Image: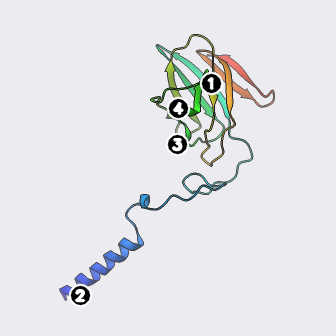
């Protein structure tokens, strides 16, 4: 009797181990295809481009805190120091990027700059796989806010 119970338990455990793997990491990642995000989830196609819609530069004691606002959720794995340039130079590799809960905003800090500077963004992806067009925003100053106007197709500047 005990042998048959043990045999059924072993068969059951073997079935469970084969049918339900312990980790999802053992499965290979699906190849990227249009209409899917990088995790293989199908996403509805969007009609507009993935772009920056606003930028805020805040002056803190020895640093400038830069907040970049997007029109859609950003793929946090695509936001890297080499994709964000200040005056043509990539930000430092050790730069820490913080994201809003809905991933429509990324924030980071750079050393203080007193003269106007430009910010360039390249190769940043949205959550559904769209790539941002290279974007350069010149003439940024501490304690300012820039917003892109679709009607005028220019950056409007405001002070904080």
User: Would you say the residues marked 2 and 1 are in contact, meaning their CB atoms lie under 8 Å apart?
Assistant: no
Residue for badge 1: 119
Q: Nearer the viewer, mark 4 or mark 2?
A: 4
State the separation of the CA atoms marked 2 and 1: 71 Å
Whichever of callouts 2 and 1 sits on the residue coming sooner in the sequence is 2
Residue for badge 2: 4
**Which residue is pictured at 65% across the width and 42% down the height?**
131
Q: Nearer the viewer, residue 39 or 94?
A: 94
| Residue 50, image x, y percentages | 68, 40
In the depicted structure, whether residue 9 falls above or below residue 30: below
| Residue 63, image x, y percentages | 49, 17
In the depicted structure, whether residue 136 falls above or below residue 14: above
Q: What element carries label 4?
A: helix
Quarter holding the C terminus is top right
State the separation of the CA atoms marked 1 and 3: 20 Å
**Which residue is pictured at 52% across the width and 39% down the height?**
101
State the separation of the CA atoms marked 3 and 4: 11 Å
State the separation of the CA atoms marked 4 and 1: 12 Å
Residue for badge 3: 77
Q: Which residue lies furthest to the right in this view?
A: 151
State the separation of the CA atoms marked 3 and 2: 51 Å
């Amino acid at each position: 009797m005990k042998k048959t119970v043990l045999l059924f338990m072993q068969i059951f455990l073997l079935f469970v181990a084969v049918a339900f793997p312990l980790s999802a990491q053992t499965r290979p990642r699906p190849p990227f295809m249009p209409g899917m995000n990088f995790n293989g989830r199908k996403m509805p196609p969007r009609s507009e481009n993935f772009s920056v819609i606003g930028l805020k530069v805040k002056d803190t004691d020895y640093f400038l805190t830069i907040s970049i606002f997007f029109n859609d959720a950003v793929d946090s794995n695509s936001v890297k120091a080499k994709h964000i340039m200040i005056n043509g130079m990539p930000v430092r590799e050790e730069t820490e990027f913080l994201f809003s809960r809905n991933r429509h905003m990324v924030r980071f800090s750079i050393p203080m700059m007193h003269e106007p500077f430009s910010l360039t963004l390249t190769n940043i992806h949205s959550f559904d796989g769209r790539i941002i067009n290279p974007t350069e925003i010149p003439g940024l100053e501490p304690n300012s806010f820039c917003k892109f106007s679709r009607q005028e197709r220019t950056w409007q500047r405001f002070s904080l």
